[in-house]
Amino acid sequence: MSAIHLHFDVPGDDFTRAGEASGSTKKRLKALGYDSDAIRRVAIAMYEAEINMVIHANGGYCDVDVYPDRVEILLADDGPGIEDIDKAMQEGYSTAPDNVRSLGFGAGMGLPNIKKYSDEMRIDTKLGIGTKLYLTIKVH
Amino acid sequence: MSTYFHSVTLQPNLCCGCTNCLKRCPTEAIRVHEGKAHILRQRCIDCGECIRNCPHHAKKALSSTMEEIENYKIKVALPAPALFGQFNNLDNIDIVLSGLISIGFDYVFEVSRAAELVSDATRKLISQGKLNLPVISSACPAVVRLIKIRFPELCDNVMPLLAPMEVAARIARKEVKDKTGASDEDIGVFFITPCAAKYTEILSPSVGSKSACNGAIAISHIYPELTSAMEHLKVIEPLSNSGLIGVGWSISGGESAAMLGEKYLAADGIENVIRVLEELEDDHIHDVDFIELNACSGGCVGGVLNVENPYVAQARIQNLRKYLPISLNHLDEKDLPNMLLDGELKFDSSIFSLDTDINKAIEKMTKMEEILKGLPGLDCGSCGAPSCRAMAEDIVQNHAKETDCIFKLKAKIQKVYDQLKDTI
C-alpha cells in the first residue's frame, strides 16, 4: 500500500517552534484530501506530544507515515523518561516546571488528550534513556 | 450565475507579470503565465489583497454603477456603516443618508440597523445554547469563503445567521413593498459597499441561492457625487435609525463589543485571520465564545473600495459613535427564523486536495516531494507560482513543467552546452 513518510526534528526549549511538525503534517494531510476528522485528531495529538517533548525532554524527533486508512506517528526523545505512566495518564497530573506552567502549558492534559484523540497509543519509556510514543489515528 | 463568479478581476493590459500579487495572495490563487497574472477562480475568496498590493492597478473589483439603479422604479440604498467613516468632520449620519436620497435613491436603510438585529440574535442564540462554540461571525464573506474551502472542521462553527447586508436587504424590500405596493421586480436594492467580496456574495452567495440585493455600488464610485450632494443639501431629513452598536460593526472589534460580554476574540487582516483559524482548528483556543474575523486590516473600513485610510476612518467612526445611543434596533423573537442562513455552509473539498482518490493523492504527493527536493527553495515566483512547493504541485497536476523554473532551465542549458562543447 502506498504511504507518505515524513520526518521532523523537534528542537528543545523553543516553545515558538513547537507545533511545526504537527502544523506541517496537517498541511500535507489537507493537500491529500484526507478525512477532516482524522486530520484534526492527528493535529491535536501530535501537537500535545510535541509540547511534551519540548517541556520534558529537550526535544527529539518525529516520524509520520500516512496510509490511506490511517496515520502512524512515532515521537521519540532521549529525555528523562516517564517515572509513573499511570499517574502521567491521569488528567491534571503534571511534572512540568513552574516557568512552563506560567505559559499556560503543564495542565496535566497532555497524555490524556493524546490518548483521547488517538485510536491506538503505546509508550516505551526507560528512566534516564528516553521515551518513544507510538500513535495510530484511523480514518473512521 | 456561475458557481465561481468573482468581483476581483484582472485588467490584462495593465498587468506586467510581476510577482507582487502572486506572493501576497492568501489562498495561492494567482499564477503568472506568459507575462500576465491569472486568477484560479475556484481558489479566489475575493479578499482584495491583490487589488491592495498591485502597484500597476491591474486588479480591480467589479461592482454596480449608478446607471444600474435606473433599471428599477424604486431605488433603495443600503449604506454600509464604513461609509460614515469616509467624511471629514461628519457628526450627523442623516447628512450622508439625505445625500444618498439627493443623488437618486428613493429609500435608504442603514445596514447598521440590521447589524444591531444580528447582534441581538447572536446573543440570543448563544444564551439558548444553540450554537457550536466558539461561534465564528458570518459577516465577512471573504472569511466565510476561506472557511468553506480550507477549514472543513470549522464550517459548523460559522454563525448560522445571515450577514447584516442580507438582513437589511430583506427588511428594506419588505418595507418598500408594504408601503408602496410595488412588486419585487420594480424594487432595486443596492448595497453601498466597502469591499469586493460583498458584490460576489450578492451574485453568488456562499450559502443559499439568491440575495435580496440587486447589486453593490463601490463607496469609491459613489463618493465624488455623494460628497458634492452632501454639501448642497437643502434639507437634512431625519432618516438615521441606528445606534453605536450598529455603526461600530464597521471597525474590527465592533461586532465583538456588541456581544456585551468578555469571552470574545477579534482578529483582522487576512493573514491574522488564517492564524486564528488554524489555532481554532487545532483546539488551541479556549475560553472564547465568539470570534469576529475581518479579512481587511482594521475591519470593513479597511476594504479596498473605501476612499479613506482605514485608521483615519476608524477614528472618525469612534468620534461619530459618541453622539449615538447604544442601540435602536431590537429583535422580535418571531423574526429570528427569517434571519437564519438559507442552508448549511458546506465544505468544498475539491479545491485544495491533490486528487479525489486518496491513493492517487498519495502518489502525487510523493512525486511532489521528490520534485520539491530538486527546486532551489527560493520561492522567488519567477516560474509563475507563488512558492517552490506550489510549483511542485503545479508540475504534478500538469499545469507547469520543471523548466519553468529559471534555475532548472539554466542548469539544463548549461548541461546542453557542456555536451556540445565536448563534441566540437
Image: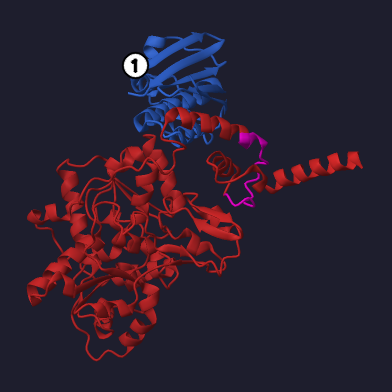
Chain colours: A blue, B red
User: Does residue B327 appear in this view?
Assistant: no
Seen in the picture, residue B129 relative to A107 is either above or below; the reply is: below
Q: Nearer the viewer, residue B255 or B165?
A: B165
Image position, residue B136 (x, y; %) = 30, 47
- Chain name for mark 1: A
Is B242 part of what is drawn in magenta? no
* Quarter placement of the C terminus of chain B: top right
Residue B421 falls left or right of residue B34: right
Location of residue A48 (image quadrant): top left
Which sits in the foreground, A20 or B56? B56
Q: Does residue B332 appear in this view?
A: yes
Q: Is residue B133 above or below residue B307?
A: above
Q: Amino acid at mark 1?
A: Gln
Q: Which residues are magenta?
A: B371-385
Relative placement, left or right, of B134 versus B175 is right
Image quarter for residue A90?
A: top left
Q: Secondary structure at mark 1?
A: loop
Q: Position of residue B362 (x, y in %)?
A: 49, 29
Residue under label 1, please give it.
Answer: A90
